[in-house]
Image (cartoon, helix red, strand yellow):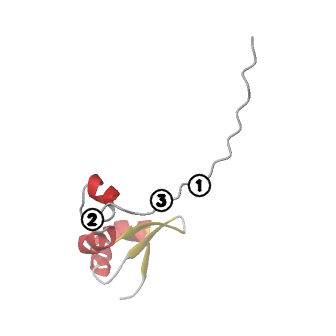
């Protein structure tokens, strides 16, 4: 079916059509002529959002936990405190 775009009004009037179209690919729903929402199957959403993992797993990034990290240099200049 290719790219399908529906206005909010069309979506509200024929939700079944939008769901059928989403089986073929994402459906863009417009609000006042501007793209506002995307309807897709849950399987497609899961594929795009990646595997479930804990915050610890996400932060670990690699099994060995060893990676290069070069923090940016911050040029911070301190002003002396002025007495009251």
Residue 69 vs 7, above or below: the answer is above
The reply, left or right, for residue 69 in relation to residue 45 is right
Q: Secondary structure at mark 1?
A: loop
Marks 2 and 3 sit apart, C-alpha to C-alpha, by 16 Å
Label 3 Cα neighbours within 10 Å, binned few <14 / some 14-19 / many ≥20: few
Residue 37 vs 17, above or below: the answer is above
- The total number of labels drawn is 3
Q: Secondary structure at mark 3?
A: loop
The reply, left or right, for residue 11 in relation to residue 23 is right
Residue 56: horizontal and vertical position, in percent?
28, 53
Tag 3 residue: 69
Residue 32: horizontal and vertical position, in percent?
53, 64
For the residues labelled 2 and 1, say whether their Cβ atoms are less than 8 Å apart: no
Q: Locate the N terminus and report the quarter of the image it occupies.
A: bottom left
Q: Earlier in the sequence, mark 2 or mark 1?
A: 2
Label 1 Cα neighbours within 10 Å, binned few <14 / some 14-19 / many ≥20: few
Tag 1 residue: 72
Residue 55: horizontal and vertical position, in percent?
29, 53
Numbered circle sitting on residue 63: 2
**Identity of the residue drawn at 68% across and 46% down:** 75
Marks 1 and 3 sit apart, C-alpha to C-alpha, by 10 Å
């Amino acid at each position: 079916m290719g790219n399908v775009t529906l206005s909010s009004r069309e979506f509200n009037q024929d939700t079944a059509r939008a769901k059928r179209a989403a089986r073929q690919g994402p459906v863009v729903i417009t609000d006042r002529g501007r793209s506002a929402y995307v309807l897709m199957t849950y399987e497609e959403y899961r594929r795009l959002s990646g595997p479930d993992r804990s915050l610890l797993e996400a932060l670990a990034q690699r099994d060995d936990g060893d990676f290069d990290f070069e923090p940016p240099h911050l040029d911070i200049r301190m002003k002396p405190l002025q007495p009251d």
